[in-house]
Image: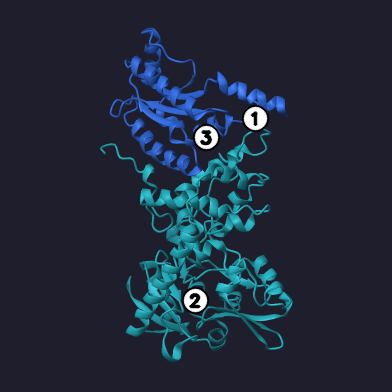
């Protein structure tokens, strides 16, 4: 197996295959890595109920096999979960998770040599609290009654315990302010080519639809992970047909195009920007939560930005946020965590991206995609 | 309230901008010195902060100066190739480009943040620079980031 090869695969364990979203390949691959001692621990989602889950680090194979699989309403982010722990770990990761992990790798908080990143195709995820509200307002069902959720043909479907299916189109949900996180709507990384191995159901054709996973190997580590799972008898793979490969590329193109459209819709040019930023940041209570969750920040407790907390000064604008704007101009990966955690609902990701979009374009630097350092850290004497 | 408004109007009348100038120890600070020695006239608007090298200037120093009430911030250093520490000002150049981008996105006018290379012998250039910037800022008026109660 080599970098660049593609396969379609599924779990050989019947119950995992049935329960997992697309053939249970990722779950089985993680379990195999754990059994064959390729890694010491893996990160999986542990179910709270039928549509919510929390990430845990575990070394128990049964815990892995019984994990929740993929859900749409999840708290991200896995990068800080494994940072500064010096673990030999394999973990599933959405595009933004992968970018966060690589950024932590650049800052020496994660050893990428010891980290197997299983990338997952992602069209967007939902905030758990918003999902609860959405269930009550839009679907008129109690969150406790939900039995299952799925996305099919642009519709988000919730199944209740009495077997009734409630479907509403995602466009309609997003028009009302529900649905995917805002940062997911304008995200343009739908297939994580920066991971070790990219998995997803796009490109699976024929009888296998819903029962298998499409896999693309992106690195030597990814090849090792997949080979290990095949050797251990956990998964079965075959070559994909050409139609599938073409279909996957087409879906990717369409999704990225939609993301680009959202980007243009949200980031309209503004005249009085200074006043806009001042107004948005007025309510900041200096809790520092946005920094704590930020997957590209690894300053720890002592940092330049938090130095400016609670100074009791008369500043017109939060100095804490100005430092964050500076630090994130080149580093922001647009994961949306800061907006998620803000207790006073400042649309932080949108503010950070206002700086990051033009700056990253001008510097020709995309954080989290590879190990390239920001351009101004690479000043050469002779240039 | 009317008293306060009246005060502000009076302030803009004979108002002198406050300009924070970061000068490197080896070149532009010397330039400021020779401006004085050569008796080149310049307005008393600049507050000079001496740093050992322009490469020492963290973008956050600049923003903090604005929040403390500066109407303009100048970043000055040795000419490219003349750095006392070999390549400190090369780093300044790249860092400044980044800082300029952030300041622009934030909505700070480009006249309020300027970069200039001034050597220790260029007293006249230093004086002219301060005079030009002061004139530009007088046209623009006080910085929108100036805190209440700071002149």
Rounded to the nearest whole Å, what is the CA distance between mark 1 and mark 2?
A: 58 Å
Q: Disc 1 sits on a residue from what chain?
A: B
Does any portion of residue A272 appear in the rendered image? yes
Where is residue A296 drawn, in percent x and y?
50, 52
Q: Which one is nearer the viewer's eye here, A25 or A71?
A: A71
Rounded to the nearest whole Å, what is the CA distance between mark 1 and mark 3?
A: 17 Å
Q: Earlier in the sequence, mark 1 or mark 3?
A: 3
Q: Which residue is mark 3?
A: B63
Determine whether A216 is above or below B113 in the image: below
Task: Give the letter of the blue chain.
Answer: B
Q: Which one is nearer the viewer's eye here, A163 or A110?
A: A163
Disc assigned to residue B148: 1
Q: Secondary structure at mark 1?
A: loop
Disc assigned to residue A26: 2
Q: Disc 3 sits on a residue from what chain?
A: B
Q: How many marks?
A: 3
Where is residue B112 drawn, in percent x and y?
46, 31
Task: Give the letter of the cyan chain.
Answer: A
């Amino acid at each position: 197996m080599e970098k660049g090869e593609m396969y379609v695969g599924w779990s050989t364990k019947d119950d995992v295959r049935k329960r997992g979203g697309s053939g249970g390949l990722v779950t089985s691959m993680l379990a195999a890595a754990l059994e064959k001692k390729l890694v010491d621990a893996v990160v999986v989602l542990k179910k709270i109920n039928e549509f919510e889950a929390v990430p845990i680090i575990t070394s128990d194979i049964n815990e892995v096999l019984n994990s929740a699989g993929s859900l749409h309403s999840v708290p991200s982010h896995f990068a800080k979960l494994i940072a500064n722990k010096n673990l030999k770990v394999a973990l599933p990761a959405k595009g933004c998770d992968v970018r966060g992990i690589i950024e932590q790798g650049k800052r020496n908080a994660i050893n990428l040599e010891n980290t197997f990143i299983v990338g997952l195709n992602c069209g967007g995820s939902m905030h758990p609290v918003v999902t609860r509200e959405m269930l009550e307002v839009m679907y008129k069902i109690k969150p406790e009654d939900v039995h299952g959720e799925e996305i099919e043909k642009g519709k988000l479907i919730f199944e209740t315990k009495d077997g009734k299916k409630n479907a509403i189109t995602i466009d309609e949900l997003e028009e009302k302010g529900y649905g995917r996180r805002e940062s997911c709507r304008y995200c343009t990384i739908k297939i994580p080519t920066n991971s070790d191995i990219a998995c997803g159901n796009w490109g699976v054709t024929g009888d296998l639809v819903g029962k298998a996973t499409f896999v693309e190997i992106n690195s030597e580590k990814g090849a090792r992970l997949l080979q290990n799972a095949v050797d251990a008898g956990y998964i079965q793979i075959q070559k994909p047909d050409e139609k599938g490969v073409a279909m996957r590329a087409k879906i990717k193109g369409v999704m990225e195009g939609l993301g680009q459209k959202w980007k243009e819709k949200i980031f309209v040019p503004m005249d009085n920007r200074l006043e806009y930023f001042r107004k948005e940041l007025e309510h900041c209570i200096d809790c520092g939560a946005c920094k704590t969750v930020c997957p590209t920040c690894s300053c720890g407790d002592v940092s330049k930005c938090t130095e400016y907390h609670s100074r009791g000064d008369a500043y017109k604008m939060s100095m804490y946020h100005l430092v964050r704007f500076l630090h994130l101009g080149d580093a922001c990966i647009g994961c949306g965590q800061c907006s998620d955690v803000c207790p006073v609902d400042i649309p932080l990701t949108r503010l950070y991206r206002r700086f990051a979009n033009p700056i990253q374009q001008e510097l020709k630097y995309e954080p989290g995609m590879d190990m390239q350092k920001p351009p101004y850290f690479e000043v050469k004497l002779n240039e | 309230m009317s008293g306060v408004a009246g005060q502000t109007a009076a302030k803009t009348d004979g108002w002198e901008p406050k300009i924070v100038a970061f000068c490197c120890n080896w070149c532009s600070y010397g330039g400021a010195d020779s401006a004085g020695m050569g008796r080149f006239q310049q307005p008393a608007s600049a507050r000079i902060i001496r740093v050992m090298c322009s490469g020492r200037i963290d973008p956050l120093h600049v923003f903090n100066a604005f929040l403390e009430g500066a109407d303009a911030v100048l970043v000055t250093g040795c000419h490219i190739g003349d750095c006392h520490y070999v390549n400190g000002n090369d780093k300044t150049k790249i860092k400044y480009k980044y800082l300029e981008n952030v300041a622009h996105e934030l909505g700070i006018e480009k006249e309020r943040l300027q970069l200039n290379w001034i050597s220790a012998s260029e007293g006249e250039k230093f004086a002219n620079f301060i005079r030009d910037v002061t004139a530009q800022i007088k046209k623009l008026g006080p910085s929108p980031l100036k805190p209440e109660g700071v002149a």
